[in-house]
Image (spheres, rainbow, N blue to C red):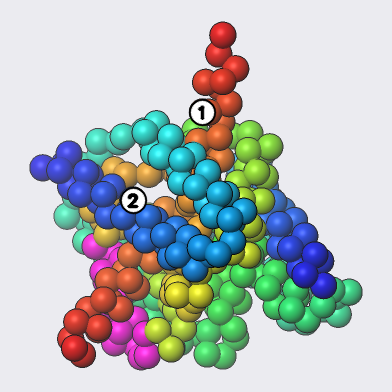
């Protein structure tokens, strides 16, 4: 059960960031419409469609997806590689799973975690480039 | 002036992220693997922050509109979420806001979608944290001020709007604590 939830959250994080970035840039819908539209779609699906996942995961997916979709709102100048976008989404999922109870119910908590996840992804890229440099 | 405003806003945003991560680390102090991964998160974030691109846009009087947009988005989402659920409320308000510039052609509406969307994150706040529309309105206004002052910070970075919203809510919670004690 815990493994399914962990996997579900991380996969949702990866899909949330990558799909938002795709709709925003490749379909030209812009960051706000992509994030809000896709999150609304996912939330409605989890609310009204009979999904073959646990109740706990179905109620968690909309929050993870909307949080990860904030990462996908990034401009292409900041991050344009889907691999790094997916990595940031996965990191967001990890942060979501280990989030502090202290800030539960604080608006903007998901966005803060998303921003940190994006920074980690960018920082990892910078570190990788520094290591690879001869 | 522009430089100082950007520096102060950047410091506030970094402080908010440090507080957020710090709370996670304190709570997971008994889990070495999580602590180690949070340490890596901290190091990678510092490296990324050092490479953040700085912008030098002017602060305009029209930017004051943003404060109103954020507060409006916050109150509307807070109200709507009592009927539809939080994520559906955020999605509905954000989606409607994204169509505003194509429906209303005034220049002051152009910057509305991201600001209203930022407000929706404030409106996601639980009634246990901010109990009432007045609190949400002030948290939205505080987030709006941070959004205006951070105009030249983290432009194009995903999650910036959420961090700004978190700042507004955090400020309001601190203010409530201070006033009550």
Q: Is residue A75 visible?
A: no
Q: Nearer the viewer, residue A120 or B120?
A: A120
* C-alpha separation, residue under disc 1 versus residue under disc 2: 19 Å
On the image, the x and y values in percent for residue B94 come to 51, 67
Answer few, some or many: residues within 10 Å of disc 2's Cα (few below 14, many 20 plus, some between 14 and 19): some
Residue visible at 44% across and 79% down? B125
On the image, the x and y values in percent for residue B131 come to 37, 90
Q: What's the magenta region?
A: B130-145
On the image, the x and y values in percent for residue B75 come to 38, 81
Residue visible at 39% across and 31% down? B51
Residue visible at 30% across and 84% down? B135
Q: Which mark is residue B2?
A: none
Q: State the quadrant of the C terminus of chain B.
A: bottom left
Q: Nearer the viewer, residue A62 or B69?
A: A62
Residue corresponding to mark 1 = A126
Q: Determine if the magenta segment contains residue B140.
A: yes
Residue corresponding to mark 2 = B14
């Amino acid at each position: 059960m815990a493994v399914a939830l962990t996997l579900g959250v991380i996969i949702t994080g990866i899909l949330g960031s990558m799909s938002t970035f795709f709709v925003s840039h490749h379909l030209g819908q812009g960051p706000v419409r992509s994030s809000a539209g896709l999150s609304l779609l996912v939330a409605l699906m989890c609310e009204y469609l009979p999904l073959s996942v646990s109740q706990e995961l179905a109620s968690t997916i909309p929050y993870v997806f909307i949080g990860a979709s904030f990462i996908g709102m990034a401009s292409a100048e900041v991050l344009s590689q889907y691999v790094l976008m997916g990595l940031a989404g996965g990191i967001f999922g990890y942060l979501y799973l280990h989030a502090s109870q202290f800030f539960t119910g604080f608006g903007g908590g998901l966005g803060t975690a998303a921003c940190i996840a994006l920074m980690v992804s960018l920082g990892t890229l910078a570190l990788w480039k520094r290591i690879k440099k001869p | 002036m522009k430089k100082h405003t950007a520096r102060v806003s950047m410091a506030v945003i970094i402080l908010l992220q440090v507080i957020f991560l710090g709370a996670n680390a304190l709570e997971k102090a008994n889990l070495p693997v999580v602590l180690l991964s949070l340490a890596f998160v901290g190091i990678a974030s510092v490296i990324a922050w050092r490479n953040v691109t700085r912008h030098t846009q002017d602060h305009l009087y029209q930017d004051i509109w943003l404060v109103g947009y954020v507060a409006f988005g916050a109150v509307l989402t807070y109200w709507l979420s009592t009927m539809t659920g939080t994520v559906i409320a955020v999605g509905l308000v954000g989606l409607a806001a994204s169509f505003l510039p194509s429906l209303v052609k005034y220049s002051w509406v152009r910057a509305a979608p991201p600001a209203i969307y930022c407000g929706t994150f404030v409106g996601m706040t639980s009634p246990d944290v901010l109990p009432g529309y007045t609190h949400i309105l002030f948290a939205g206004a505080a987030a709006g001020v941070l959004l205006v002052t951070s105009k030249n910070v983290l432009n194009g970075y995903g999650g910036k709007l959420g961090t700004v919203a978190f700042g507004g809510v955090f400020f309001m919670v601190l203010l409530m604590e201070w006033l009550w004690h």
